[in-house]
Amino acid sequence: MIAKPRDTTWKVAAIIWEALKRFDRDDGWAISAHIALNALLAIFPFLIFVTALAAFLGAGQMSGQIVHIIFDTWPQAVAAPLASEVDKVLTTPRGGVLTIGVLLTLWVSSSAVESLRIALGRAYHCPTSKPVWLSRLQSMWFVALGALGLVVVAVFIVLWPILWDFAINHRYLAWLAAFEFASDVLRYALTVIVLAIALLAAHLWLPGGRRKVADVLPGVIATIILFIAGATVFSIYIARFANYASTYAGLAGAMTAVVFLNVSAALFILGAEFNAVLVERRKGRAAGCSNPKSRAAADRIGARGRPRTASA
């Protein structure tokens, strides 16, 4: 039996409403602020680590491309002040990738991953059962993989125009010139693909329990769509309505970034809550708490997503 469009609309609306209620119950805005602050603190150390890694791999000239990969999807009003400061930081001479200073930046950057772990654990009601030291090592490993991925993508973006020009100038591949616009779109779509892979990895491996790709893919897609739409709306808001300079003076750029990161983190958590609702409706159980230790930790989450006290 084919579902009527009206029934499908009400079903989708009910799922969205349930995800919003879970977001409020799990202290979504408080966790979003936690993620935003950690992300702002981590972005400079992370880029320092990426630059050091690129230099170690012989691709030190790619640092500018790496900055563009990160900030091109951000609203101009948010990205411009941060990008200019990042350029100043990245032009400062530093040691090799294995120096103590860079290892410390790796540690600081991993704090942002830990905040994402907390958010996902609350959303899925499956907090991690890993020891603290193992969780931190995993977060540092995530940062290192992310940095390596950014370097590879930067190299690809730089080499792509060269390879494309070589291809269309070849007598047997000249017909590719008709698809030059599509080539540019695909090149920049690579950033979205990298973001999708990072989100999938976070949903699958950061919180406790086990989930399949099919369980987390809807929330990842929703997060990307909402992020693109939210960045567009935020750009309009900054350009036409907001005047942070009159309130925060010289801190306007930083405060704009905090607000944007806060909203982005909220959309990330909403994607997880959306996944949790879908899984619970489909399987009739908490989303992915198949590990006994994770289930025990999830059972300690109270009605508002906080650990219950002994008297509870």
Image: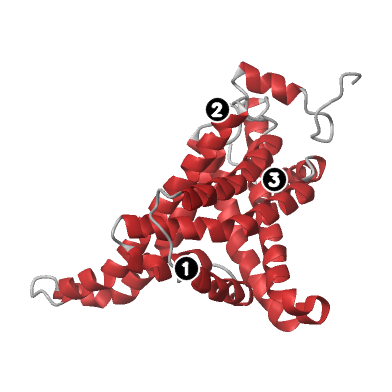
Q: Amino acid at mark 2?
A: Arg
Q: Earlier in the sequence, mark 3 or mark 1?
A: 3
Task: Name the residue that disc number 3 marks.
Answer: 7
- Looking at the rendered image, the quarter that the N terminus falls into is top right
Q: Are marks 2 and 3 in contact (CB under 8 Å)?
A: no
In terms of depth relative to the viewer, which is nearer, 157 or 123? 157
Q: Helix, strand, or loop for circle 2?
A: loop
In the image, residue 213 above or below residue 73: above
Which is more N-terminal, label 3 or label 2?
A: 3
Which residue carries the number 2 mark? 210
Nearest to N terminus: mark 1 or mark 2: 1
Q: Which residue is mark 1?
A: 90
Vertical order, 253 against 209 (above or below): below
Q: Where residue 217 sits: x, y (%)? A: 53, 43
In the picture, measured across the screen, residue 112 lies left or right of residue 30, that is left
Residue drawn 59% across the image and 52% down it? 222
Residue 207, label in figure: none
Q: CA distance from mark 3 to mark 1?
A: 54 Å
Question: Observer-nearest residue: 179 or 12?
Answer: 179
